Image: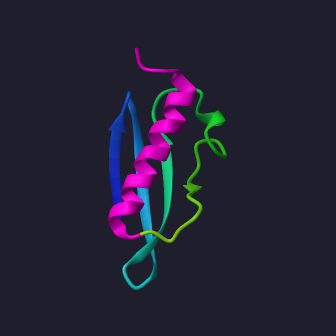
Amino acid sequence: MRRTITYRGFKIHVELTPSADDTFNVTFQIQGGTNLEVLGARGGRIPLRNGPFTERWAYLVAEIAGQAAIDVLLGPID
């Protein structure tokens, strides 16, 4: 299962992989902009820890993690 979220000119690609009944492991990848080498292995997929998650939590946690990584790259929103 996949979802793409747009945030501050970047795209956060979230992918869920079934783990057990109604739970998922989740990875995200940030694309767009420049200087992505600082985010993971050259903009590669980043697995989230402390899972598995329910579907709803998996998407929420991945979106927040992706937004936080972009905020670190670009600085705070004015």
Q: Residue furthest top?
A: 78
Q: Residue furthest bottom?
A: 21
Q: Is residue 65 above or below residue 77?
A: below
The residue located at (45%, 33%) in the rendering is 32
Please state the horizontal and vertical placement of residue 63, each as a whole percent of the image. 41, 47
The residue located at (61%, 39%) in the rendering is 39
The residue located at (42%, 66%) in the rendering is 16
Instruction: State which quadrant residue 53 falls in.
Output: bottom left
Q: Is residue 54 above or below residue 29?
A: below
Please state the horizontal and vertical placement of residue 66, each as a whole percent of the image. 47, 43
- Considering the whole magenta stretch, tell me its main secondary structure: helix
Instruction: State which quadrant residue 14 falls in.
Output: bottom left
**Magenta region:** 54-78
The verdict on residue 73 being magenta is yes
Q: How many marks?
A: 0
Please state the horizontal and vertical placement of residue 47, each as a whole percent of the image. 57, 59
In terms of depth relative to the viewer, which is nearer, 51 or 12? 51
The quarter of the picture where the N terminus appears is bottom left
Left or right: 32, with 73 as reference point = left
In terms of depth relative to the viewer, which is nearer, 68 or 41? 68
The quarter of the picture where the C terminus appears is top left
In terms of depth relative to the viewer, which is nearer, 67 or 45? 67
The verdict on residue 21 being magenta is no
Q: Is residue 69 above or below residue 15?
A: above
Task: Identify the image's colour scheme: rainbow, by chain, secondary structure or one colour.
Answer: rainbow
